[in-house]
Amino acid sequence: MKNKNFYIGNTIFKNPVFLASGPAGYGIEYRDLINLEKLGAVVTKTISLMPKEGNSGTRLQETEAGLLNSVGLENVGARCFFEEKFPELLNAGAKPVVSLACEGKEEYISLLEITSKQKKVEAVELNLSCPNVEEGGMAVGTDPELLRWYITKAKLILGNITVLAKLTPNVENISSLAVVSERAGADGITAINTLLGMDINLKSGGPVFDRVVAGLSGPAIMPVALRAVWEIAQVVRIPVIGVGGISSVEDSAKFFAAGAAAVQIGTAIFYDPGLPERIVDSLEV
Amino acid sequence: MTDLTMGSYETELLLSEKVSPSSFLLTLSKPDRFIDAMPGQFVSIKIGEGISPLLRRPYSIMDITKDSIVLLVRVVGKGSALLASRKKGDLIEIIGPLGGSCFELKDDLNAVFIAGGTGLAPLVFAARKWTKEKKPGELHLLYGAASSNEILADLCMRDFTEVHIATIDGSKGFNGNVVEMFQDLSERGVLPEGQLFSCGPVGMVKALLDSNAASFIDHHTSLEAVMACGVGACRGCVVPLKSKNGIEYRSVCGDGTVFRAEDIDWKRWGK
């Protein structure tokens, strides 16, 4: 893998190193720590039609080599995002990929319509896989019919905007869902979202998180992500973007070797914000 | 609050000094950027070499000297124990100064500081900074700990007009907790009128609010939280604030660490 321009759908990226959706927020929070301009893209935190306040109670729990989160897609909503956050991210020199929530069908269509009117949006990533919300999210990404519907609608309404489908590993057969996504028109597959987990507070004897379950990310999930990327890359022709626990330049090289066209860095930026740029450097021709 | 950016720095551990059975002062070389760090701001430290523990750990700034950053660390788990084992000359990666709000003293006013445990750190920083840069009135510190050997008041006796100490076991100063001492001192008219600043366990700050702290002009508190990003991005360390529509979440790292104590929805925070 080298740093050179490549296409996913109609969108050109200057290198295959992206920030993953979630940890980096709207991207701009990290502009003093990460040279966003140097990266292939910044995938924003997931945006829903209306503002979401996120989940109550504990939202983070460190594990051995991992991190459980139950943030619950807290975000400012599409209107505020496109008016305030998105232009700032562009001004910071980043190439944004906007992560879109897949909530109820009506809200989703409105969200796509608003997104389609934004002249500067080149690419979106459909979050078909968040484990931390009641409606939409992972439920959509585990049902082939719903998956097909959400992707088809996005392609239809978004026109030339590139559509990535982010899949959940919490299924029996992720590659068959990747095939469904490709047939529905997805321009690329992002794999994987977090694994479902939980923790118990031994003092209370009850779950740590108000919603009981949470999403596990970090180095602990890398083998699962790598396996998913490998399997998906065998069965689809569209680019596969590998994400899950990448913590070193070597980890990213494994994803490229497994068939990833690009990688995303998520949880690692919490402890090593210099990693994405080091991966870019490692790919210098 | 000045709008200055934080950065990632490699600092040198200049001194690690045990100051109580469970706490130590960590002195790190100072990157230039820290010259205008504010009380209530913090740094996030990469504790170990690899991925264990995974997350950085946040520590409130206790002092900024000409050449150094001083932090107060209490050993409570794996991360802090590892940090305690680092030696003089070790290189320590930090990000900072972090935090979007800080303690602020209005001119000429008195300040009453209430600290529990390592909550002492930002309050000492505030007292030192204001004494240097402002014309504060009286600065009173009320400091509580379980026992006299955990009282770190010797570190900061000269920074305050008066230091009042409470121990639960009665081994030094007032016999009881710091909030009971606060009530006692208030009733006896020992404390001057002015602003109230606190940092300590959730139970302490809640109890302060339930006491007669309302008679002060306002009460700002610096919160502690488990954090991931430290920069307000990930929304992992949010605190619920009361709002017209119920609650609003603010991040402790990006919007805090300092909040008006009354604004916090204490029923939902620190359960």
Image: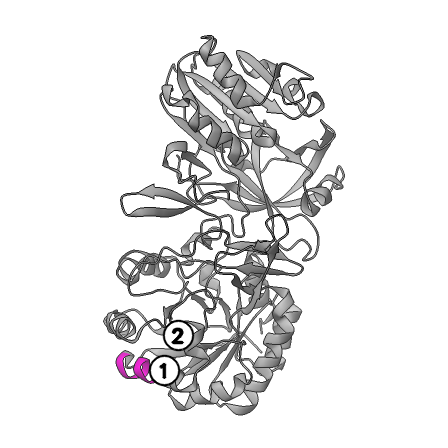
Q: Quadrant of residue B84?
A: top right
Give the magenta-colored segment's residue range.
Answer: A151-157
Badge 1 vs badge 2, beta-carbon distance below 8 Å: yes
Residue matched to label 2? A126
Reading the image, the residue beneath label 1 is A151
Residue at (52, 56) in percent of width and height: A209
Which residue type does callout 1 highlight?
A: Ile
Measuring from the top left, give residue B45's x and y in whole percent. 61, 45
Q: What's under tag 2, amino acid-wise?
A: Leu
The residue located at (37%, 25%) in the rendering is: B218
Residue at image coords 34%, 71%: A103
Residue placed most toward the observer, B173 or A246 = B173
Alpha carbon of mark 1 to alpha carbon of mark 2: how far?
8 Å
Question: What crowding class fits label 2: few (fewer than 14 Cα within 10 Å), some (14-19), or many (20 or more)?
Answer: many
Quadrant where the N terminus of chain A is found in the figure = bottom right
* Rendered location of residue B197, percent (x, y): 46, 25
Q: Is residue A74 above or below residue B143?
A: below
Q: Which chain hosts label 1? A: A
User: Above or below — where is A42 with respect to B252?
Assistant: below
Q: Secondary structure at mark 1?
A: helix
Work out whether residue A276 can be spotted. yes
